[in-house]
Image: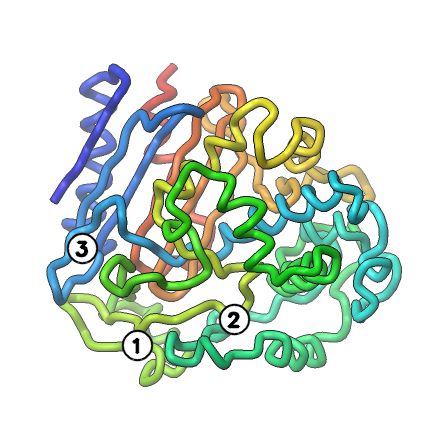
């Protein structure tokens, strides 16, 4: 099934380019499914859906299908920290240890440096940091990460010396949110971000609400990465049967909710981004939103390409802020163009292990010189 909608007048060339590229992704077995939406702050300009959320059951994707969003979650964590700063619950320029006594990396690292990945916190490979759906009710993430922190006690660089992406840094930010707010991380995000959006709360959560609605994650069976995957996770535990040319994943959760735990529909993430595009958003004031999207410089004045969780970029002369989320079975990207007051998202139910900037290929159709 292919669904392509446009509520604004777009040229046939633009439509053809997007349809051709995304259709090729599915028909050439580069992904079981894909969903893409381009929008302004009030409405969806174009949407595309194609492929299967479940290959075995021949279940086609639609707007109700949820995906694991992985590291896109970090943008919610950063927004939560800025909300708490705005409420004077903390100051991002102060040391982490001032708000989180358990912090073991010294007294010089600031909250802001955790947010922009310049704290020097290690980043051990996290693909095996997942647990099965059946283990979720008894999983103790604090105990799990306590042992991880013990094994990674030393920082890799001085504060704000250089950019170095760290999932562990965002584990700490999640714990910081809990210390300062008195709520669990999930409850804080749900109450202060998700419930303020014009969406069904079940469309953006930290749980798989329905197996029928959740896209099954897949990894290409005949691929070098499939061989490598065997050294990183226990396939017999985390992976299911072969379906067509794909090996399926059993439903799982990311161990660290604050760096990768969100699960939702593409349209729910659109609602989140639309709110960030608005002046005086209900999520955060313009003053603090400017802080969120201010690119960081190192101690030597070098641009890092990173704001407070958001990566910077430019497409056809248009500046954007973006984040990708990927791991076993899923890959997605979210993006906003503040000057154009537009944004985009793309979601796949296939493994993605790096920031592909896939939206560059799609969004350029709306930015022809």
Q: Which of marks 2 and 3 is nearer the N terminus?
A: 3
Say what secondary structure mark 2 lies in: loop
Report crowding for label 2: few under 14, some 14 to 19, many 20 or more residues within 10 A (C-alpha). many
Q: Is residue 280 left or right of residue 342?
A: right
Say what secondary structure mark 1 lies in: strand
- What's the coloring here? rainbow
**In the image, what residue occupies the spot 82% across and 45% down?**
93
Rendered view: 327 above or below 291: below
Query: How many circles with numbers are drawn on the protein?
Result: 3
Say what secondary structure mark 3 lies in: strand
Q: In this view, does 161 lie to the left or right of 324?
A: right
Report crowding for label 1: few under 14, some 14 to 19, many 20 or more residues within 10 A (C-alpha). many
**In the image, what residue occupies the spot 19% across and 61% down?**
54
Q: Is residue 49 left or right of residue 121?
A: left
**In the image, what residue occupies the spot 36% across and 58% down?**
330
Disc 3 designates what residue? 52
The picture places residue 141, in percent across and down from the top left corner, at 58, 75
Q: Earlier in the sequence, mark 3 or mark 1?
A: 3
Report crowding for label 3: few under 14, some 14 to 19, many 20 or more residues within 10 A (C-alpha). many
Cα distance, mark 2 to mark 3? 27 Å
Disc 1 designates what residue? 239
The reply to whether discs 3 and 1 touch (Cβ–Cβ < 8 Å) is: no
Q: In this view, does 277 lie to the left or right of 23?
A: right
**Residue 148 in view in this figure:** yes
In-front residue for pair 164/116: 116
In-front residue for pair 369/277: 277
Disc on res. 255: 2
The picture places residue 89, in percent across and down from the top left corner, at 78, 48
């Amino acid at each position: 099934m292919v669904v392509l909608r446009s509520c604004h007048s777009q040229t046939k060339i633009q439509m053809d380019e997007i349809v051709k590229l995304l259709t090729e992704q599915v028909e050439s077995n580069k992904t079981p499914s894909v969903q893409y939406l381009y929008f302004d702050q009030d409405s969806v300009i174009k949407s595309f859906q194609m492929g299967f959320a479940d290959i075995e059951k021949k279940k086609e994707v639609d707007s109700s299908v949820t995906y694991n969003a992985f590291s896109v979650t970090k943008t919610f964590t950063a927004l939560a920290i800025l909300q708490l700063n705005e409420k004077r619950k903390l100051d991002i320029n102060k040391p982490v240890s001032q708000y989180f006594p358990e912090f073991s990396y010294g007294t010089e690292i600031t909250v802001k440096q955790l947010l922009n990945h310049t704290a020097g916190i290690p980043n051990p490979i996290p693909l095996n940091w997942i647990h099965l759906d059946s283990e979720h009710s008894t999983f103790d993430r604090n105990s799990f990460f306590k042992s991880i922190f013990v094994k990674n006690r030393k920082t890799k660089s001085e504060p704000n010396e250089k950019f170095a992406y760290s999932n562990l840094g965002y584990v700490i930010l999640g714990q910081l949110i809990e210390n300062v707010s008195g709520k669990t991380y999930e409850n804080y995000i749900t109450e202060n971000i998700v419930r303020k959006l014009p969406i069904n709360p079940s469309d953006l959560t930290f749980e798989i609400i329905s197996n029928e609605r959740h896209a099954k994650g897949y990894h290409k069976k005949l691929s070098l990465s499939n061989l490598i995957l065997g050294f990183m996770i226990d396939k017999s535990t985390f992976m299911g049967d072969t379906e067509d040319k794909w090996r399926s994943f059993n439903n799982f959760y990311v161990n660290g909710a604050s760096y990768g735990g969100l699960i939702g529909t593409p349209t729910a993430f659109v609602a989140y981004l639309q709110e960030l595009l608005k002046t005086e958003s209900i999520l955060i004031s313009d003053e603090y939103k400017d802080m969120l999207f201010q690119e960081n410089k190192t101690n030597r004045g070098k641009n890092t390409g990173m704001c407070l969780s958001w990566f910077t970029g430019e497409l056809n002369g248009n500046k954007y802020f973006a984040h990708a989320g990927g791991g076993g079975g899923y890959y997605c990207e979210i993006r906003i163009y503040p000057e154009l007051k537009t944004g985009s998202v793309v979601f796949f139910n296939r493994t993605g292990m790096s920031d592909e900037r896939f939206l560059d290929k799609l969004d350029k159709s709306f930015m022809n010189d």
